[in-house]
């Protein structure tokens, strides 16, 4: 997986810099999401990896599949990816582009998993505390997982805060076995 990210990084960086220069980060993000979703479809992946298709026809096929949703600069970007045989990297390019965008906007997506529904006021306090700690705007998505037993598990990029009962029991079991 690291190799795919390494291959995708220059394309994501170029797309980000171009989009930033056009003040079109949101448009690029939406259209890259579409391209990544289309490329991730198994039937499309099979079609795009057909050796009998030229790179130009692969690019045009992908552009046609996306319909009128793609702007001219995104269509040119797809053609560049096709010429370099990198259409399959669209999901990784999207992921890196999103990271560059979040860095620029000083925001971070936080996933909060709890055993029970978290009240809005608690969620807001956690978001504020994380925002201060990370010095970024925090966008929180929540979900529930009854296997946590209680507490909360928070993921913000590389940062993981495990305040769940299950996590504490696992730590206790590990300490007792050592």
Image (cartoon, rainbow, N blue to C red):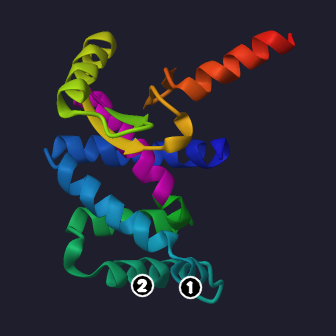
Q: Residue furthest left?
A: 23
In terms of secondary structure, where does tag 1 sit? helix
Query: For this rendering, which residue is in front, 31 or 80?
Result: 31
Q: Main secondary structure of the magenta part?
A: helix
Q: Residues within 10 Å of mark 1 (few under 14, many from 20)?
A: some
> Mark 1 sits on what residue?
47
Q: Is residue 146 left or right of residue 170?
A: left
Q: Please state the extent of the stretch shown in magenta in the rendering.
A: 91-108
Residue 157 colored magenta?
no
Q: CA distance from mark 2 to mark 1?
A: 9 Å
The x, y position of residue 21, in whole percent, is: 18, 41
> Mark 2 sits on what residue?
61
Q: Contact (CB < 8 A) between labels 2 and 1?
A: yes
Q: Is residue 148 left or right of residue 177?
A: left
In terms of secondary structure, where does tag 2 sit? helix
The x, y position of residue 7, in whole percent, is: 58, 48
The x, y position of residue 139, in whole percent, is: 26, 34
Say which residue appears at 75% left-offset and 18% top-offset. 173
Q: Is residue 112 visible?
A: yes
Q: How many numbered marks are there?
A: 2
Q: Earlier in the sequence, mark 2 or mark 1?
A: 1
The x, y position of residue 23, in whole percent, is: 13, 44
Query: For this rendering, which residue is in front, 101 or 171?
Result: 171
In the picture shown, does residue 19 fall above or below 91?
above
């Amino acid at each position: 997986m690291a190799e795919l990210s390494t291959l995708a990084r220059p394309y994501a960086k170029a797309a980000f810099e171009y989009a930033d220069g056009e003040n079109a980060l949101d448009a690029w993000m939406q259209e890259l999401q579409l391209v990544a979703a289309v490329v991730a479809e198994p039937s499309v992946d099979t079609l795009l990896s057909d050796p009998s298709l030229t790179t130009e026809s692969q690019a045009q096929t992908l552009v046609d599949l996306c319909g009128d949703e793609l702007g001219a600069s995104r269509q040119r970007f797809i053609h560049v990816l096709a010429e370099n045989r990198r259409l399959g990297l669209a999901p990784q390019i999207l992921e890196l582009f999103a990271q560059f965008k979040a860095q620029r906007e000083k925001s971070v997506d936080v996933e909060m998993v709890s055993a029970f529904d978290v009240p809005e006021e608690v969620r807001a306090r956690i978001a504020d505390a994380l925002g201060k700690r990370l010095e970024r705007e925090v966008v929180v998505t929540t979900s529930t997982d009854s296997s946590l037993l209680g507490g909360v598990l928070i993921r913000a990029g590389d940062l993981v805060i495990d305040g769940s009962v299950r996590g504490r029991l696992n730590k206790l079991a590990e300490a007792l076995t050592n």
